[in-house]
Image (cartoon, grey):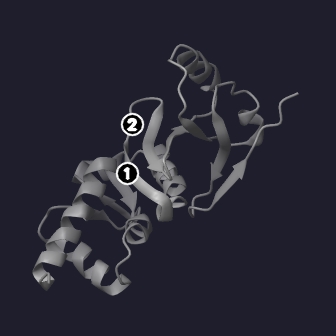
């Protein structure tokens, strides 16, 4: 049987891993990531902040790996993490990606990429992904509007997503003509 300290240390390591992988997440995203009771998780977060292992920016409600990360958080990554949380129950593995992919993850034996497309970057994304090897990866593409989604022409898009500031994700599929 594991001791309380062993359990606590394991969850602290997992929490630190998530924050250092994604650099800045909202406080609520971190709480939703872990199945612990809210109060014990909040105590763990508070303890890690006191130890200086993570930083909390109360004005932006962000938990960060470094103090200066809060100055310029990657809001696209934060939006992508909201999408990832919708797959939480079936997640096998997840990690951050390289441009243009924000997050890679595996769910129910399928590979996924979460891609965020800033406004007016549709042509660039189309061009970059046209020159990548065709793969079986499923793509979830975050856009700012349905009109923006109509400008994106890449393979394997299973859904376009719009993420509001509160973390609510709406999913859309583009009807091909």
Find residue 97 and report its horizontal and vertical position in percent: 39, 36
The quadrant of the rendering that contains the C terminus is: top right
Find residue 14 and report its horizontal and vertical position in percent: 25, 62
Q: How many marks?
A: 2
Cβ–Cβ below 8 Å for labels 2 and 1?
no
Left or right: 71 in relation to 116: left
Left or right: 5 in relation to 100: left
Q: To which residue does mark 1 refer?
A: 93
Badge 1 element: strand
User: Callout 1 environment at 10 Å: few (<14), some (14 to 19), or many (20+)?
Assistant: few
The quadrant of the rendering that contains the N terminus is: bottom left
Badge 2 element: loop
Left or right: 54 in relation to 24: left
Residue placed at 51% from the left, 57% from the top?
A: 82
Residue placed at 57% from the left, 23% from the top?
A: 125
Quick check: 176 above or below 3? above
- The image quadrant that residue 143 belongs to is top right
User: Callout 2 environment at 10 Å: few (<14), some (14 to 19), or many (20+)?
Assistant: some
Q: To which residue does mark 2 refer?
A: 97
Q: Looking at the image, which is closer to me, 70 or 9?
A: 9
Find residue 58 and report its horizontal and vertical position in percent: 35, 68
Quick check: 37 above or below 9? below
Marks 2/1: CA–CA distance: 13 Å
Quick check: 3 above or below 18? below
Q: Looking at the image, which is closer to me, 137 or 126?
A: 137
Find residue 152 and report its horizontal and vertical position in percent: 69, 27
- The image quadrant that residue 124 belongs to is top right
């Amino acid at each position: 049987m594991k001791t309380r300290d062993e359990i606590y240390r394991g969850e602290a390591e997992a929490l630190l891993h998530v924050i250092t992988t994604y650099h800045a997440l909202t406080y609520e995203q971190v709480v939703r990531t872990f199945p612990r009771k809210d109060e014990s998780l909040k105590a763990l977060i508070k303890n890690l902040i006191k130890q200086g292992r993570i930083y909390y920016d109360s004005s932006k409600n962000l938990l960060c790996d470094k103090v200066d990360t809060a100055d310029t958080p990657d809001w696209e990554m934060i939006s992508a993490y909201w999408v990832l949380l919708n797959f939480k129950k079936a997640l096998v593995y997840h990690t951050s990606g390289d441009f243009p992919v924000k997050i890679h993850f595996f769910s129910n034996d399928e590979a996924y990429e979460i891609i965020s497309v800033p406004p007016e970057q549709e042509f660039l994304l189309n061009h970059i992904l046209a020159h990548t090897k065709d793969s079986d990866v499923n793509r979830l593409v975050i856009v700012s509007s349905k009109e923006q989604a109509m400008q994106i022409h890449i393979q394997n898009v299973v859904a376009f997503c719009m993420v509001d500031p509160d973390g609510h994700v709406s999913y859309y599929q583009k009807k091909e003509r």
